[in-house]
């Protein structure tokens, strides 16, 4: 477990003004932030978004992480924050076994917001992508690259965390789009693990067993980097696609070893939970269970769509943002200024909208 404490100074801006914050009152608020997959660059981008929110709103943010995605360990981190007096907690939920404990904390008066990985049994809002739809987008991009409905060949699908609802939903969406080309044969999803070393080794084994594959598609952050490396080592013979706008993923796309990566707005997944918690705490309001769509981003070497009404950027600019948290926070001001108190207090969409 790694714990990082920060106490950002208040940055006067649209969000602080929209929420009616005063620095004296805001500094009384401590938000706990709990994440899985310690060391993963995508998860770090989520945490960077949370840090930006804390800085904008002038609250104290305390971050805790664990390696992998064991729900028992993550629940303990959340419970530690609750027991130590955090007024609100944002956490990913990598297992249904966390639901009872999280609901007890919520029942005790500490608001919780889920992000990135969710349980529909938790009585709390969730901030994340529309998971099935993002899978449809990824699958459609790969089918189009392979030639559309007439495409033929073997496609290998990999999942770094089998059983997680969000990732299973992505797989569902990918497979739905791949069916538009009846000549494609889908193998998997296979467990390709989440650590960078294990992830590459699993993909290498899968491709070694199926060298005729025309496309390899991953559902997690490490996959595009692994697939790009594997493709480069084998003469760039397959179409590689996957998720997240990390530096190494974008590098693989730029160099032509991977075709497409789908972003899930990591900054939003970190920022919005903190904003929701602070707004609820300051207003003495209870958060309603429901879904907040973080949005999807589509990036190929030829086109970048950042979503969320954000300004257009070039591929090179997207690469720079992936490597610079401060520049990312400045870029997202076009979105953060839309987070008025009324918007943050409004009833969210039903949680079922996540998997539509």
Image (cartoon, helix red, strand yellow):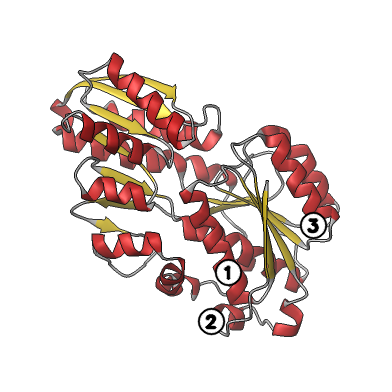
Residue sitting nearer the eye, 218 or 134: 218
Residue sitting nearer the eye, 236 or 356: 236
Image quadrant assignment for residue 284: bottom right
Task: Identify residue for label 3.
Answer: 110
Circles 2 and 1: CB atoms closer than 8 Å = no
Q: In the image, what residue occupies the spot 70% across and 83% down?
A: 23
Secondary structure of the residue carrying numbered label 2: helix
Q: Is residue 293 visible?
A: no
Judged left or right of residue 260, residue 326 is right
Q: Is residue 198 above or below residue 64?
A: above
Q: Earlier in the sequence, mark 2 or mark 1?
A: 2
Q: Earlier in the sequence, mark 3 or mark 1?
A: 1
Secondary structure of the residue carrying numbered label 1: helix
Residue 107: give x, y in percent of width and height: 83, 50
Q: In the image, what residue occupies the spot 52% across and 31% down?
A: 161
Residue 291: give x, y in percent of width and height: 57, 51
Q: In the image, what residue occupies the spot 62% across and 70% down?
A: 54
Crowding at label 2, few (<14), some or many (≥20) Cα neighbours within 10 Å? some
Q: Is residue 319 above or below residue 67?
A: below
Image quadrant assignment for residue 344: bottom right
Residue at mark 2 to residue at mark 3: CA–CA distance: 26 Å
Residue at mark 2 to residue at mark 1: CA–CA distance: 12 Å
Task: Identify residue for label 1.
Answer: 53
Q: Is residue 274 above or below residue 229?
A: below
Q: Earlier in the sequence, mark 2 or mark 3?
A: 2
Front tag of 2 and 1: 1
Front tag of 3 and 1: 1
Residue at mark 3 to residue at mark 1: CA–CA distance: 19 Å
Residue sitting nearer the eye, 287 or 156: 156
Task: Identify residue for label 2.
Answer: 14
Crowding at label 1, few (<14), some or many (≥20) Cα neighbours within 10 Å? many
Residue sitting nearer the eye, 226 or 331: 226
């Amino acid at each position: 477990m790694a714990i990082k404490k920060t106490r950002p100074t208040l940055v006067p801006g649209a969000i602080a003004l929209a929420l009616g914050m005063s620095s004296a009152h805001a500094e009384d608020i401590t938000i706990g932030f709990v994440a899985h997959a310690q060391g993963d660059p995508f998860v770090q981008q989520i945490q960077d978004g949370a840090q930006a929110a804390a800085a904008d709103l002038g609250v104290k943010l305390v971050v805790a992480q664990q390696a992998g995605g064991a729900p028992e360990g993550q629940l303990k981190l959340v419970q530690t924050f609750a027991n130590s007096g955090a007024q609100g907690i944002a956490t990913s939920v990598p297992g249904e076994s966390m639901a009872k404990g999280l609901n007890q904390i919520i029942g005790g008066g500490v608001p919780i917001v889920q992000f990135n990985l969710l349980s529909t049994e938790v009585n709390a809002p969730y901030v994340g992508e529309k998971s099935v739809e993002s899978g449809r987008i990824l699958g459609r991009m790969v089918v189009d690259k392979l030639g559309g409905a007439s495409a033929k060949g073997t496609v290998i699908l990999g999942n770094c965390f089998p059983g997680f609802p969000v990732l299973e939903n992505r797989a569902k969406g990918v497979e739905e789009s791949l069916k538009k080309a009846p000549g494609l044969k889908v193998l998997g999803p296979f467990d390709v693990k989440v650590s960078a070393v294990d992830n590459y080794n699993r993909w290498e084994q899968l491709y070694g067993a199926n060298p005729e594959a025309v496309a390899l598609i991953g559902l997690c952050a490490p996959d595009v980097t692994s697939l790009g490396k594997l493709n480069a080592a084998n003469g760039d013979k397959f179409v590689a696609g996957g998720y997240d706008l990390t530096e190494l993923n974008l590098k693989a796309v730029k160099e032509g070893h991977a075709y497409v990566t789908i972003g899930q707005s990591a900054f939003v997944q970190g920022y919005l939970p903190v904003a929701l918690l602070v707004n609820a705490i300051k207003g003495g309001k209870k958060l309603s269970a429901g879904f907040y769509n973080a949005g999807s981003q589509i990036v190929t070497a030829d086109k970048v769509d950042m979503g969320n009404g954000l300004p257009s950027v070039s591929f090179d600019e997207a690469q720079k943002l992936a490597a610079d948290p401060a520049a990312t926070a400045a870029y997202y001001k076009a979105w953060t200024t839309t987070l008025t108190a009324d918007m943050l207090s409004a009833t969210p969409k039903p949680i079922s909208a996540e998997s539509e």
